[in-house]
Image (cartoon, grey):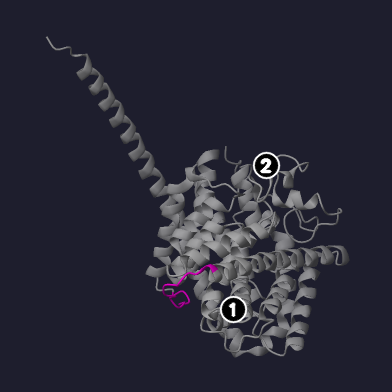
Amino acid sequence: MMSREPFQRLRNLTQLHLREQLAIVAYLVRWVILGSVSGVLAGLSSAAFLATLNWATDARLANPWLLYLLPVAGLVIGCAYRYIGGKSAGGNVLIIEEIHEPTDWIPRRMAPLVYVGTVVTQLFGGSAGREGTAIQMSGSLTDWFSRLAHLDRNDRRMMLIAAIGGGFGAVFGVPIAGCVFALEVQAVGRMRYDALVPALAASLVGDLVVRGLGVKHTPLPQIGAVDLTPLLIGKFVLAGLVFGLASILFIEVTHAIKGLLGRVVGWSPARLVVGGLVIILLVGVVGNRDYLGLSLPLIAASVAGGAGVVSAAFLWKLVFTAVTLGSGFPGGEVTPLFVIGATLGVTMGRLLDVPIPLMAAVGFVAVFAAAANTPLTCTIMGIELFGSGPVVLFAVACVVAYIFSSHRGIYGSQRVDTSKGPAGMLEGLGPSALTLHQLIQRHRPPRPAATGPGDPDVVALPDDDDPPAG
């Protein structure tokens, strides 16, 4: 008589498998729904922001005299952040910190403050971007939802990761890169796959909402297949090194301006007034207004062949942006980094005898890859924006730029999980859980903080009516 034991084992395994699959389905449905909620909030806020930003850019171009009111606009923005902003000045750094250690709610006032502040900055001629605003709006609104839904500490962390993906994917129209960015940006050398489902859902839904509302992203040319040769790859390795060094220059100049104004100008709103005056002076020195606002025409000219783009364009955009952000104006670094990368790509294309549209497209993503420590995100972004033809060159330049940016980045709360070079590079600097900001501070003398997280000149306000999550 045949034993029933094998059939019983098979039955038990089948039941176990079904229970596991049902649990996975329930988990998947839950996080698709929650991630989609974050995506809707990101998409709605980004669509409104992009439409308003287009209006502000058109108004500035039609009324050149608005530039001369930039110091006044800076005073208003600075007072708003000082007297009613609370922790909102922490921006993206605060959101990443809360993902690492959820302790307090993201201020609800962050979303309207950064929305209005960035639009005003663009309207009057400050050089800032869009990513920081989109992520801060998405993070603030998503955390507000988490509060209403009484989500626990771990779920709130997952939702903030989704918010980053939703904001990034929606504002740039790159849903896959947005998802990967949310997983990659939190730490140098490590990705968080536990938030993959909500991050992907949020980024996809956010992008669909923006497109569904009829808000258009700036079209970029598609680049066809590239005939790879060892010489061509070598040229892009060299270019990647330069792109990485350019990101360090941007980070260091911005930090230096923050530190200088923090020491010289005691009242934080006055720092924005000084920054506005310097921007006006720089326009007089340059003799044109190409570097104000988003400077999207510079990107279009660069990827079209570089006609009219001067060799020092990347340096001018770097200085205009460092002054704007270093003095405390709100906005993002990413679009200016795109401009810096594309225009530097024009210069490198001329020097290395490489097709300028190709080098400009690679520079577009590689400088940001170095500054944000997100080489995978930027390789995927290059494919989504310019096509898969140069995928190998995107990857080569982004990885090399990432390595040569060393342990620096525009997000000071990124934790260093893995050294970019030999393990001894971090020897004596403490555990790998240290943030980029903490690592850099080990090499710098103490100095008064400037505008941003921990600014002593920002009035502390209660940010929540309810107890924190967890």
**Tag in front: 1 or 2:** 1
Q: Which residues are magenta?
A: 216-230
Q: Residue at x 22, y 17 (%)?
A: 6
Q: Is residue 163 left or right of residue 264?
A: left
Type of the residue with mark 2: Ala
Let me know if residue 273 appears in the view.
yes
Q: Which residue is mark 1?
A: 349
> What quarter of the picture does the N terminus occupy?
top left
Residue 28 drawn at (x, y percent)? 37, 43
Q: Nearer the viewer, residue 156 or 316?
A: 316
Q: Please, which residue is most extreme toward the top here?
A: 1
Let me know if residue 144 appears in the view.
no
Q: Secondary structure at mark 2?
A: loop
Q: Residue at x 60, y 87 (%)?
A: 61
Q: Which residue is mark 2?
A: 433
Q: Please, which residue is most extreme toward the front here?
A: 230
- Circle 2 residues within 10 Å: few <14, some 14–19, many ≥20: some
Q: Main secondary structure of the magenta part?
A: loop
- 266 relative to 16, above or below: below
Location of residue 226 by image quarter: bottom left
Is 98 magenta? The answer is no
Residue 68 drawn at (x, y percent)? 73, 85
Type of the residue with mark 1: Gly
Q: Residue at x 76, y 58 (%)?
A: 458
- Circle 1 residues within 10 Å: few <14, some 14–19, many ≥20: many
- 290 relative to 81, above or below: below
Location of residue 268 by image quarter: bottom right
Q: Nearer the viewer, residue 216 or 319?
A: 319
- 269 relative to 458, above or below: below
